[in-house]
Image (cartoon, rainbow, N blue to C red):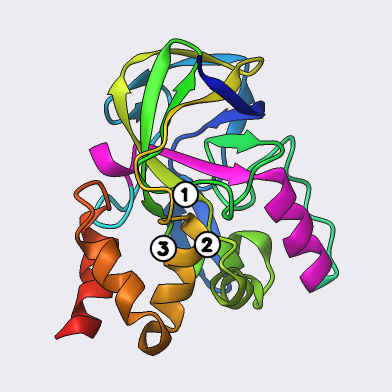
Amino acid sequence: MNKILSKIISLKVGKAKELKNKEKVMQSAINKTIVKESYLTDIGFKGDDQFNKKYHGGPNKAVLFYSSLTYEKVNEVLNINLDYKDISPLGENILVSDIAEDDICVGDILKLGEAIVQVTQPREPCNVLSINTKNKEMLKTVMKYGYTGWYAKVLEEGVVKQTDNVELVERLFPNLTISKLNKAKSNPKDNLDFIQESVSCEVLGAPFKEALAKHLR
């Protein structure tokens, strides 16, 4: 029997729009809106988009999860009050309760309504987080504390609803938590054994694996 890990608080999709960065205007799909349900395909939710496909999207980054617990930590560290239930200041597709980066492992197979996904890697954030939240410390804070969220690929397509649970179907690599992977990337010298274990994991996303593997050469 599957184990219920959390509930979906909100489900969010969005198209690329203009995002102002001082005097410049850029395109980004970080700002998403809540929907009651959406069909999850092998490259993401219908109605969702990624503008810079070199770094975002694709089968291994089809879905971005973020935790309400992590949002609260971000708010506390930065002494701010981000509204994250109704919008997506950090660009997530699925906002979850009860679990965070310490509780999810690469390789975890999760059931979301009709769909089944597999966790592939931590998110590797960029400066769009600071631009979108209008907080110059946002990116630095997310990276320093590992408040990244996590990506998943789609094993079975299907409809996901805002009322669905997040169920753990199988845990294949219990040591490879999102939190540990973030710590290994930020402090590789003290985590070489863990990095060796991580890069041997066939599920770990290629960009993240390459970032770790360079410290073993």
Q: Earlier in the sequence, mark 2 or mark 1?
A: 1
Write the residue at 41% across / 74% down: 184
Residue located beneath label 3 in the image: 124
Q: Position of residue 143 (x, y in %)?
A: 54, 73
Residue located beneath label 2 in the image: 179
Residue 73 colored magenta? yes
Amino acid at pointer 1: Trp
Whole-angstrom CA distance, mark 3 to mark 1, is 9 Å
Q: Quadrant of residue 119?
A: top left
Q: Quadrant of residue 191?
A: bottom left
Asked whether the beta carbons under mark 3 and mark 2 sit within 8 Å of each other, the answer is: no
Residue nearest the observer in this picture, 130 or 75: 75
Amino acid at pointer 2: Ser
Q: Earlier in the sequence, mark 3 or mark 2?
A: 3
Asked whether the beta carbons under mark 3 and mark 1 sit within 8 Å of each other, the answer is: no
Residue 20 falls left or right of residue 76: left
Position of 19 relative to 113 (above/below): below
Position of 130 relative to 108 (above/below): below
Residue nearest the observer in this picture, 74 or 201: 201
Write the residue at 48% across / 65% down: 180
Element on which disc 2 rests: helix
Whole-angstrom CA distance, mark 3 to mark 2, is 13 Å
Residue nearest the observer in this picture, 95 or 215: 215
Stretch of the chain drawn in magenta? 57-77
Disc 2: CA contacts within 10 A as few (<14), some (14-19) or many (>=20): many
Q: Main secondary structure of the magenta part?
A: helix
Q: Which mark is residue 150?
A: 1
Residue 187 shows up from this direction: yes
